[in-house]
C-alpha cells in the first residue's frame, strides 16, 4: 500500500503564548479532495506554513507521500504542489517564463519543462496566453497559471490556500471543478477555505476551529452524525462553541 | 544538475526582472552619477588628496571617490534586494522559492548570487560612464575588479538578507536607510581617505576602519588599479561569511526569527 498523500499527526504550534494549533491530526489519501474548513483565524494558514516548512513544527509529525517534512524536507517538498493565498507570479514575466522558473527549481530540464508547460496550459485551455505577461491576465487566469505551476513537477499532494479569494463566480466554479477532476485522477488535495459553497457532498471534510480539529469525515456523513440538515449548520454548530 | 538548473533559473529570473524594471536601473545609475558629476566636482577644490596607494600620482577627487561610488551601487542594491525580499515575501514569490525541494541555504545563497550579478552589471555601466568622463584606470583593472565586486556585493547582499529576515514591513526600509545605509556609507573610506578622517576624529577613523563597507571599497579601489589588498580581501570575506551564516539562520524555519513574527 502506498503512503497517504498527507499525514498530519499531533501537530501543535504556538505564537508565543497564543496557541494556534492544538494536537491537530488528519490524513489525506491519494485521490481524495479534502476541504479544510474553518473561519478566519482558525489556524489554516499556520497549518499550511507548517506543511510547506515555512515554519517548523516542533511537536508532532507531518508526512508528505510518506516523507517526514522535517527529516527529509527536500524529498517531502518535491512531492508537494502549492497554490498560496497571495499571488506569487512575477507580473512582468510571461506565463512561460514564470512556469520555466518553477520547473527549474524542481530540477526539470528545459525540453521536458516546455513539454509539460504546453500540456498543462492546454489542459487549462490557456495555450494562447503562453507568451502573455502575467500582468495582462485577469485574476482567474492568474490562478490557473498558479495551478498549472503547482502541477508541473507532478506532485502527490496539492495544497490550495483559499485559492478563490478575489475571483468572480465563473472562475471560482471552474477552479473548483478542475481541482475535483485532479483528485479523481488520483491526486491528494487539501483545499483550505472558509466558504462552504466550495464544498462538494462527496468531499472529505476537516473542520478546524480555534486550532483544533472539530470534525472529520465525508461531508454527508458529518451532516448525518451531527443530525443537522446542511453543511451551513455543521459549520455553525462546530464553530460557535467557544473553546 | 538540479542544483545548477535552479541556480541558473534564479539568476535568470533576477536578470529578466531587472531588464523589465528600467526605472530601477536608471535610478540606480543616477545616484552615483549625481555624486560623481556634482558632489565630487564641487569638492574637488576643497579636498586635496595626497599620494596614497594604490595611486601613483596626485589624483582628482572624482578619481578618488569612483571606487566608493561603485561600492555605493553594491550597498544600495544589496539593501534594495533585501527590500525586494520583504516585498517578495509579502507577495509570496519568496515562498515559492523556499518551498523548492533544495536545501534552504542553497536557495538563499543562489538568490544572493543573482542579486549580486545585477549589481555588478550596474557597476560596470557606471564605470563605463566614468571612463567617458575621464576616470580611466588601467584596462587590466576592469578585469581584476570583477572578483572584488562579486565579494563586496555578496557581503552587502548577505547583510541585507539578514536584515530582511527580521524586517516586518516595507515601511521599515526607511529605517534601514537611516540606520544602516547612511552610517555605513559616510563612516567609510568611500568619500574620504582614512588619514583625513583621522585628523578630524580618531574615533570616527577607528569606526571607519572596522566598517566592512570600507574594506569592500578598498578592495575594489586596489583591484581597479590592478593591485590586490590581502587585508581588505580577508576582512570582506570573513564578514561576508558571518552575514551569510546569520541570514541563513534568520530564514531557518525552526531557529530563526520568521516563526516568532507570525504569518
Image: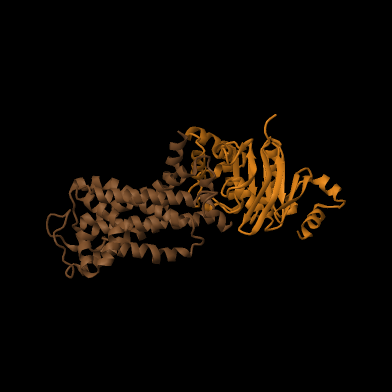
Chain colours: A orange, B brown
Using residue A176 as the reference point, say whether residue B43 is left or right of it.
left
Q: Nearer the viewer, residue A133 or B138?
A: B138
Q: Residue furthest right?
A: A227
Residue sitting at x 60%, y 45%: A82
Residue sitting at x 54%, y 52%: B92
Residue sitting at x 63%, y 59%: A17
* Residue A11 place in picture, x, y as percent: 66, 47
Give the mark count. 0
Using residue B193 as the reference point, say whether residue A199 is left or right of it.
right
Using residue B263 as the reference point, say whether residue B242 is left or right of it.
left
Using residue A20 as the reference point, say whether residue A111 is left or right of it.
left
* Residue B262 place in picture, x, y as percent: 58, 57
* Residue B52 place in picture, x, y as percent: 16, 57
Instruction: Tell me the quadrant of the picture where the N terminus of chain B can be found.
Output: top left
| Residue B138 visible | yes
Instruction: Tell me the quadrant of the picture where the C terminus of chain B can be found.
Output: bottom right
Q: Which of B260 and B87 is in front in this view?
A: B260
Residue A159, picture quadrant: top right
Q: Residue furthest top?
A: A1
* Residue A201 place in picture, x, y as percent: 79, 45
Residue sitting at x 47%, y 35%: B2
Amino acid at each position: 500500500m502506498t503512503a497517504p498523500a498527507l499525514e498530519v499527526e499531533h501537530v501543535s504550534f504556538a505564537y508565543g503564548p497564543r496557541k494556534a494549533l492544538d494536537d491537530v491530526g488528519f490524513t489525506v489519501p491519494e485521490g481524495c479532495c479534502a476541504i479544510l474548513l474553518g473561519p478566519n483565524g482558525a489556524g489554516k494558514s499556520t497549518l499550511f506554513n507548517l506543511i510547506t516548512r515555512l515554519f517548523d513544527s516542533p511537536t508532532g509529525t507531518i508526512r508528505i507521500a510518506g516523507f517526514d517534512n522535517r527529516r527529509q524536507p527536500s524529498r517531502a517538498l518535491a512531492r508537494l504542489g502549492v497554490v498560496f493565498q497571495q499571488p506569487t507570479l512575477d507580473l512582468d514575466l510571461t506565463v512561460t517564463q514564470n512556469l520555466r522558473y518553477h520547473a527549474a527549481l524542481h530540477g526539470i530540464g528545459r525540453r521536458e519543462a516546455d513539454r509539460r508547460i504546453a500540456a498543462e496550459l492546454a489542459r487549462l485551455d490557456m495555450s494562447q496566453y503562453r507568451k502573455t505577461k502575467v500582468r495582462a491576465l485577469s485574476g482567474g487566469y492568474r490562478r490557473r497559471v498558479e495551478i498549472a505551476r503547482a502541477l508541473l513537477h507532478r506532485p502527490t499532494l496539492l495544497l490550495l490556500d483559499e485559492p478563490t479569494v478575489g475571483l468572480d463566480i465563473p472562475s471560482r466554479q471552474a477552479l473548483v471543478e478542475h481541482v475535483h477532476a485532479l483528485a479523481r485522477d488520483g491526486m491528494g488535495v487539501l483545499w483550505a477555505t472558509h466558504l462552504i459553497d466550495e464544498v462538494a457532498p462527496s468531499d472529505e471534510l476537516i473542520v478546524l476551529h480555534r486550532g483544533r480539529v472539530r470534525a472529520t469525515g465525508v461531508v454527508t456523513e458529518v451532516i448525518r452524525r451531527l443530525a443537522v440538515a446542511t453543511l451551513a449548520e455543521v459549520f455553525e454548530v462546530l464553530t460557535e462553541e467557544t473553546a | 544538475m538540479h542544483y545548477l538548473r535552479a541556480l541558473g533559473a534564479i539568476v535568470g529570473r533576477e536578470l529578466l526582472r531587472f531588464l523589465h524594471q528600467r526605472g530601477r536601473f536608471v535610478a540606480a545609475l543616477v545616484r552615483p552619477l549625481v555624486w560623481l558629476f556634482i558632489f565630487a566636482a564641487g569638492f574637488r577644490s576643497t579636498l586635496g588628496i595626497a599620494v596614497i596607494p594604490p595611486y601613483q600620482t596626485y589624483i582628482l577627487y572624482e578619481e578618488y571617490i569612483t571606487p566608493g561610488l561603485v561600492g555605493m551601487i553594491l550597498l544600495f542594491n544589496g539593501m534594495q534586494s533585501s527590500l525586494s525580499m520583504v516585498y517578495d515575501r509579502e507577495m509570496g514569490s519568496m515562498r515559492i522559492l523556499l518551498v523548492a525541494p533544495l536545501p534552504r541555504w542553497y536557495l538563499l545563497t543562489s538568490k544572493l548570487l543573482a542579486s549580486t550579478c545585477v549589481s555588478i552589471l550596474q557597476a560596470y555601466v557606471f564605470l563605463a560612464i566614468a571612463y567617458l568622463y575621464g576616470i580611466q584606470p588601467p584596462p587590466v583593472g576592469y578585469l581584476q575588479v570583477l572578483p572584488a565586486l562579486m565579494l563586496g556585493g555578496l557581503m552587502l547582499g548577505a547583510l541585507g538578507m539578514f536584515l530582511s529576515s527580521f524586517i516586518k514591513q516595507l515601511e521599515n526600509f526607511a529605517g534601514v536607510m537611516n540606520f544602516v545605509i547612511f552610517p555605513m556609507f559616510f563612516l567609510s573610506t568611500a568619500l574620504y581617505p582614512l588619514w583625513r578622517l583621522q585628523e578630524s576624529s580618531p574615533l570616527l577613523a577607528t569606526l571607519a576602519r572596522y566598517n566592512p563597507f570600507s574594506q569592500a571599497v578598498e578592495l575594489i579601489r586596489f583591484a581597479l588599479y590592478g593591485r590586490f589588498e590581502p587585508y581588505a580581501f580577508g576582512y570582506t570575506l570573513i564578514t561576508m561569511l558571518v552575514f551569510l551564516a546569520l541570514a541563513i539562520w534568520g530564514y531557518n524555519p525552526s531557529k530563526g526569527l520568521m516563526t516568532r513574527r507570525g504569518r
